[in-house]
Structures are given as structure tokens and as C-alpha cells.
């Protein structure tokens, strides 16, 4: 049950991250309202970092911004650390 919930969580935030990056790239090209970088980082922190990484490559978006990428990789690290802690606690109960 817990594993299924975690998979659904990650799937949801990865899809949301891809959509957010795609929307942001579209808006950037057309000069419209943009998605805040803090929102993109929050999606990565919540588990959407794989989708974010895919979208960065697919849309060629945000990859050249060094500060953005530094914060992005920090959010990946924090997410993986949190996942490790959750899984280690979960396995202790089994």
C-alpha cells in the first residue's frame, strides 16, 4: 500500500513538473506570464525531479542557468535523502 502511494506521488509530481516546464518554455517564447523558478524547484523537491530533468532536456529549458541548476541539484539531493529516510523507516516496521 505504501509503495503504491509513493509511486502515485512521484508519478503525479513528475507529470506536473513536465507540464510546468513545458508551459514555462511556451510562455518564455511568447513573452507571456512565466512559472516562478521557486515553483519549479518545489516540484523537484516534492519528487518531480526526474520529470523536471527530462523536461529540461526535451525543451532545452533552464539548463544554462547555473544558479537555477545548482538549486535544482540541491533539491534532488534533499528529495533523495528524504526518500531514503522514509524507506529506511518503512523497512524498520516490516
Image (cartoon, helix red, strand yellow):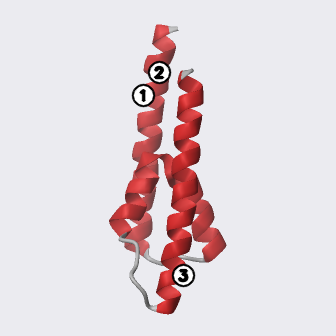
| Residue 15 in view of the camera | yes
Q: Earlier in the sequence, mark 1 or mark 3?
A: 3
* Closer-to-camera residue (88/51): 51
The spot of residue 18 in percent (x, y) is 57, 62
Q: Label for residue 54?
A: none
Whether 46 is drawn above or below 15: the answer is: above
Q: Which residue is mark 2?
A: 88
Separation of residues labelled 2 and 3 (CA atoms): 40 Å
Residue at 53%, 79% (x, y): give it. Answer: 25
61 with respect to 78 (left or right): right
Disc number lying in front (1 or 3): 3
Q: Residues within 10 Å of mark 2 (few under 14, many from 20)?
A: few
The spot of residue 83 in percent (x, y) is 47, 34
The spot of residue 35 in percent (x, y) is 40, 72
Q: Are marks 1 and 2 in contact (CB under 8 Å)?
A: yes
Whether 38 is drawn above or below 6: the answer is: below
Whether 57 is drawn above or below 88: the answer is: below
Q: Which residue is mark 1?
A: 85
The spot of residue 30 in percent (x, y) is 50, 91
Q: Earlier in the sequence, mark 2 or mark 3?
A: 3
Residue at 38%, 55% (x, y): give it. Answer: 42
Separation of residues labelled 1 and 2 (CA atoms): 5 Å
Query: Which quadrant of the structure image shows residue 85?
Result: top left
Whether 32 is drawn above or below 64: the answer is: below
Q: Label for residue 26?
A: 3
Element at badge 1? helix
* Closer-to-camera residue (16/67): 16
Amino acid at each position: 500500500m505504501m509503495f503504491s502511494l509513493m509511486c502515485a506521488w512521484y508519478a503525479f509530481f513528475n507529470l506536473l513538473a513536465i507540464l510546468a516546464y513545458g508551459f514555462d518554455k511556451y510562455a518564455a517564447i511568447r513573452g507571456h506570464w512565466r512559472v516562478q523558478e521557486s515553483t519549479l524547484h518545489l516540484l523537484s523537491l516534492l519528487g518531480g525531479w526526474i520529470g523536471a530533468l527530462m523536461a529540461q532536456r526535451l525543451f532545452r529549458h533552464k539548463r544554462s542557468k547555473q544558479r537555477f541548476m545548482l538549486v535544482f541539484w540541491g533539491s534532488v539531493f534533499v528529495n533523495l535523502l528524504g526518500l531514503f529516510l522514509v524507506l529506511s523507516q518503512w523497512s524498520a516496521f516490516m
